Image: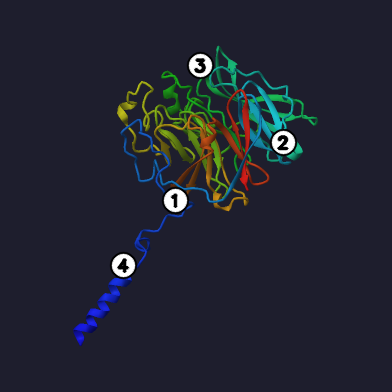
Amino acid sequence: MLSKLFFALSTVALISFNSCNPGDNAAPEPDPETPGLPPVDTTKPNTKYNPAFEGQTRGPGMKTTTALDIKVLSEGLVNPWGIAAMPDGRFLITEKGGTMRIAKTSGELSSPIIGLPAVNSNGQGGLLGVTLDPGFANTRMAYWVFSENIDGGTLTAVAKGRLSDDETKIENPTVIYRATPAFNGTLHYGGRILFGKDGNLFVSTGERSNTETRPKAQDLGTGLGKIVHITKEGRPVAGNPFEGTAGAMPENYSYGHRNVQGLALHPETGDLWENEFGPFGGDEVNRIEASKNYGWPTITYGLEYSKDSINNGLTQKEGLEQPVYYWDPVVSPSGMTFYSGDLIPEWKNNLFIGCLSGSHIARLKIDNNNKVVGEERLLADQQQRFRDIVQGKDGALYAICDGAHGRLYRIGKK
């Protein structure tokens, strides 16, 4: 009797097991919005360097679950470089050749705004980043970066001026800062500018690319390869980290940068973040702290364009900051912004970066420990060189693309 009962129970159990869906015991599919998908970059890296910590490069992939509405609003911009959101919902956009335009959310563009100082638009130069006075609705003051001819060379300069009431010209344009020394070249000007929480300006400069000027990124007595912290009048901010340091320019805030083309403030912590071009590999994202040395050219995760190592392949050194994240091969990161809107809640506090050679917009999810825990590539199918990106008053993202028929995109919710 007992043997028959045991046989019956075993048969039932076997039938029950065999009737289960095989997927019931499989690992659950990851939520596409939650990091955990395979890395988005599947190309072969240029180097064999090992990251300093897990997730420093090729972090977990993720995918936006919100249905997106992506629109090309205009193709009438000429090599746009910087975009700033105006209080009324429109945008002030710089064009590399030396003009500004105002864009409506419909895509309608103003005539070129005149009255700006002359720029040297050769190479990577021209009219670059732009930002608006926090009190712009009353002051109508704009601040911008440009490459200026001076002393037989060029340099990164910062100017300010008032947008006229009829919005046709810049009134009383004044150069307030120059990143010296000048150099006879046309590369690596940096060029981003934004207001910090203290009402003063952060400006990025480049080290001008040449092997002659490259070491000046480590020289606090120059304005090359730096992030500087200046007042609206262009003076060093009181309390800057190198104030009173012998031989140092007091406007310098951080150093050891190559070519910073992205600056953004975290909407909750207020921390300053940047991205910068690496050489052949090694594009970086960094969280900036006052007085810190970010390594270039002493350490890097990239190679010379000849594919030779830089500084014997040194990627880490005590006292030099590691990037929060890096790409190899490069994506050529440019303008960037943190998302703080409510239109697409899953994007809250995520970092969005326009990528030039990468031809996409990178979305990075950053945890409370300032580590990148997810990466997504948006608009890769558009095959555009995304130069800058900003959040609009309506909570959508607006991006501009490099080129003679430069596009203005709106990225919102369906």
Position of residue 211 in the picture relative to residue 268 (left or right): left
Task: Give how far across and how far down residue 189 sits, in percent.
Answer: 53, 24
Of pointers 3 and 4, the one earlier in the residue sequence: 4
SS for dot 1:
loop
Of pointers 3 and 1, the one earlier in the residue sequence: 1
**Can you name the residue that lies furthest to the bottom here?**
1
SS for dot 3:
loop
Judging by the rendered image, the residue that carries numbered circle 1 is 35
Task: Give how far across and how far down residue 144 sits, in percent.
Answer: 63, 29
Question: Dot 4: few (<14), some (14–19), or many (≥20) neighbours within 10 Å?
Answer: few
* Alpha-carbon span between mark 3 and mark 1: 42 Å
- Whether residues under marks 3 and 4 lie with C-beta atoms below 8 angstroms apart, the answer is no
* Alpha-carbon span between mark 4 and mark 1: 34 Å
SS for dot 2:
loop
Judging by the rendered image, the residue that carries numbered circle 4 is 18
* Alpha-carbon span between mark 4 and mark 2: 63 Å
Question: 11 or 32: which is nearer to us?
Answer: 11
